[in-house]
Image (cartoon, grey):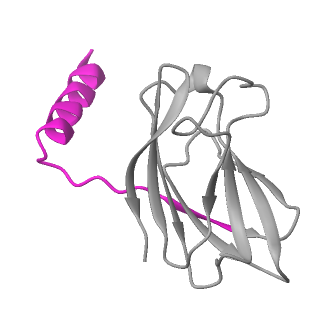
Amino acid sequence: VEGIGTVSEQVRQLRAGELSSYNEVRTISNRNGSNNYVLQNDTHIFNSWIGGNGSGNLYLPLVANSEGRTIQFHSDNTISANTFVKLLPNVTDTSATIDGASEYAVNRNYDGVTILCQNSNWYIIQKKDK
């Protein structure tokens, strides 16, 4: 089938760096007590804050569906130690951790963190603190 050959060639070009790849960025407006969820196709999430001090929750996808997946999280100047977002494993992933911890706080403006799912856990593979 000709379509399969075309797709195979595009995959080869992406792997070789011959084509540019672009990722859609999803912005989440967090507030105190909010619960948000990483969606199936999310690769980059940009966090902002609305309202008074507090924390919001951002739940990661199931580890069973995420082996090898990386997700990047960023924050703008509205995120701080008093207005922050907690990254949490999916509520049904009772033994999953993020670098061995039960959560990871995005609590600085212009923060950035990339996580990787490996062996039913999430690992921080890159982090930027301002």
- Give the side of residue 101 with respect to residue 115, left or right: right
**Is 126 situated above or below 84?**
above
Write the residue at 69% across / 56% down.
86
Residue in view at x 65 percent, y 28 percent: 62
x, y percent for residue 106: 60, 63
Q: Quadrant of residue 127?
A: bottom left
23 relative to 124, above or below: below
Left or right: where does residue 121 sit relative to residue 18?
Answer: right
Q: Quadrant of residue 3?
A: top left
User: Residue 108, position in %: x, y?
Assistant: 56, 75
Q: Position of residue 8 (x, y in %)?
A: 22, 25
Q: Which is nearer the eye, 61 or 97?
A: 97
Is 45 magenta? The answer is no
Location of residue 50 with respect to 40 vertically, above or below: below
Q: What residue occupies the far front of the structure in this picture?
A: 100
**Position of residue 35 measured from the top left corner of the image (x, y, whole percent):** 82, 54
For the N terminus, the quadrant is top left
**Number of numbered discs:** 0
Q: Which residues are magenta?
A: 1-28
Direction top: furthest residue: 1
Please check the rendered image and state whether residue 7 is part of the magenta-colored stretch, yes or no.
Answer: yes
In what quadrant of the picture does the C terminus appear?
Answer: bottom left
Q: Is residue 120 left or right of residue 10?
A: right
